[in-house]
Image: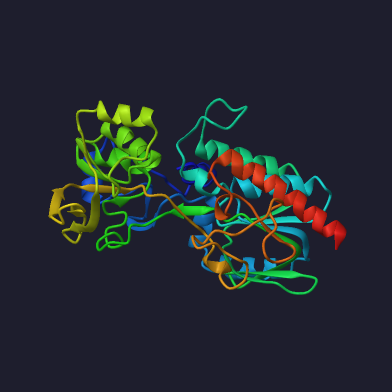
């Protein structure tokens, strides 16, 4: 909304209209919107999900990707190239730039998963903030230093080579550096059952803070009994008509204080030892969920309009398979300095084996990896 409003303010030929889905339910039904933000250009669906001004312009200008790739390919080698723009990547960029070495950071979207976080109340020194605001502060801090920020760039392959390491991008460009720090983070884990992919953004959602208001007064399910799942159920219970929380294990794994809060809510039903086997729909949107009782083997169905998947994270490391050593969970194996199995390649944050995936831990990891990379450069 901010990007489109800015475009409308700057250009009188552009008109932007914002619709609050929670207040204008008729508009939501008519346009068949099941996830926000959804953008229409001249009445035709243009995009869905968070988009920056850069992303909007790149989508309109079809030749932008090729031109940008040519510009990136012509760049001189970096001393430190950071791949990923979340808290770990931002911290690494600040620490590397302060050493006076040539630093670059390439990311799909600056802020990473923080952009999809509503409230942040446990980052020491900041009593309370919101994810998008925090992400903006990260980028502003990095831009204070001499860092080459390359947004809208997705890494495709890491090519270790004597002297210089190459990072190939989906755009076709190749960046070179004397050391690389991987901070690509993680994404929501899928349950991989029939109907999940078919009805994504048509009732299947992963961000209760973003899409919860669209299900006002309706029936929804939350899959996952950890902190994320129980927090989502509590949050949604104040908006929707009824919440069914489905947990695979025989007990919830969330903190006791969250479980007590959940138990006090009259419009929440908890199903334990239950395995989701299918998400059903009418071809246009979700209309139910099928689960199996793991004790009896009996199959049951729940009629509902929305399913929120909250079963953890998957590291964004597929592009590294066959190069750096990964754990059985796909996490990058790092030592105490953030060094990977390849000399000169470091990693930090949620993509690594470091335990406890937290913003403050990722930021500390990023700083450590940058210092590790600098030490490597001095010694080599």
Q: Is residue 101 left or right of residue 2?
A: right
Q: Is residue 296 above or below residue 72?
A: above
In this orientation, which residue lies closer to the viewer: 34 or 113?
113
Quarter placement of the N terminus: top left
Quarter placement of the C terminus: bottom right
- Rendering quarter of residue 362: top right
* Residue at 15 percent of width and 53 percent of height: 296
In this orientation, which residue lies closer to the viewer: 189 or 271?
271
Horizontal and vertical percent for residue 251?
A: 30, 41
Q: Is residue 347 above or below residue 226?
A: below
Q: Is residue 34 left or right of residue 334?
A: left
* Residue at 61 percent of width and 59 percent of height: 333
- Give the mark count: 0
- Rendering quarter of residue 210: top left
* Residue at 60 percent of width and 51 percent of height: 85
Whether residue 120 is visible: yes
Scheme by which the image is coloured? rainbow
Horizontal and vertical percent for residue 321?
A: 56, 70
Whether residue 146 is visible: no
- Rendering quarter of residue 139: top right
Q: Which residue ends up furthest to the front in the rendered image?
A: 295
Horizontal and vertical percent for residue 102?
A: 80, 56
Horizontal and vertical percent for residue 336?
A: 69, 50
Q: Is residue 85 left or right of residue 199?
A: right
* Residue at 21 percent of width and 53 percent of height: 294
């Amino acid at each position: 909304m901010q990007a489109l409003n800015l475009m409308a303010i700057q250009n009188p030929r552009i008109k932007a209209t914002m619709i609050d889905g929670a207040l204008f339910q008729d508009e939501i039904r008519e346009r068949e919107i099941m996830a926000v933000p959804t953008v229409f250009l001249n009445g035709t669906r243009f995009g869905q999900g968070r988009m920056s001004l850069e992303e909007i312009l790149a989508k309109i200008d079809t030749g932008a990707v090729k031109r940008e790739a040519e510009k990136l390919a012509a760049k001189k080698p970096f001393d430190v190239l950071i791949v990923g723009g979340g808290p770990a990547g931002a911290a690494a960029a600040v620490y590397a730039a302060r050493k006076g070495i040539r630093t670059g950071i390439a990311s799909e979207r600056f802020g990473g998963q923080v952009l999809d976080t509503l409230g942040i109340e446990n980052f020491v020194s900041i009593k309370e903030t919101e994810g998008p605001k925090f992400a903006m502060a990260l980028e502003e801090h990095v831009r204070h230093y001499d860092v080459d920020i390359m947004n809208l760039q997705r890494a495709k392959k890491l090519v270790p080579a004597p002297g210089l390491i190459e990072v190939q991008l989906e755009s076709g460009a190749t960046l070179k550096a004397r050391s690389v720090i991987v901070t690509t983070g993680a994404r929501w884990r899928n349950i991989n059952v029939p109907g999940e992919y078919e009805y994504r953004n048509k009732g299947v959602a992963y961000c209760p803070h973003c899409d919860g208001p669209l299900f006002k007064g309706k029936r929804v399910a939350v899959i996952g009994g950890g902190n994320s799942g129980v927090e989502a159920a509590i949050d949604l219970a104040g908006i929707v008509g009824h919440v069914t929380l489905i947990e695979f294990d025989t007990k919830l794994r969330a903190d006791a204080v969250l479980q007590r809060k959940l138990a006090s809510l009259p419009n929440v039903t908890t199903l334990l030892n239950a395995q989701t086997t299918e998400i059903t729909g009418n071809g246009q949107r979700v209309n139910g969920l099928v689960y199996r009782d793991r004790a009896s083997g009996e199959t049951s169905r729940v009629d509902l309009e929305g399913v929120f998947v909250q079963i953890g994270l998957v590291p964004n490391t597929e592009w590294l398979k066959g190069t750096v050593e990964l754990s059985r969970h796909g996490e990058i194996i790092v030592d105490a300095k953030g060094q990977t199995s390849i000399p000169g390649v470091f990693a930090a944050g949620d993509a690594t084996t470091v335990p406890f995936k937290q913003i403050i831990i990722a930021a500390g990891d990023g700083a450590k990896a940058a210092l590790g990379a600098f030490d490597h450069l001095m010694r080599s």
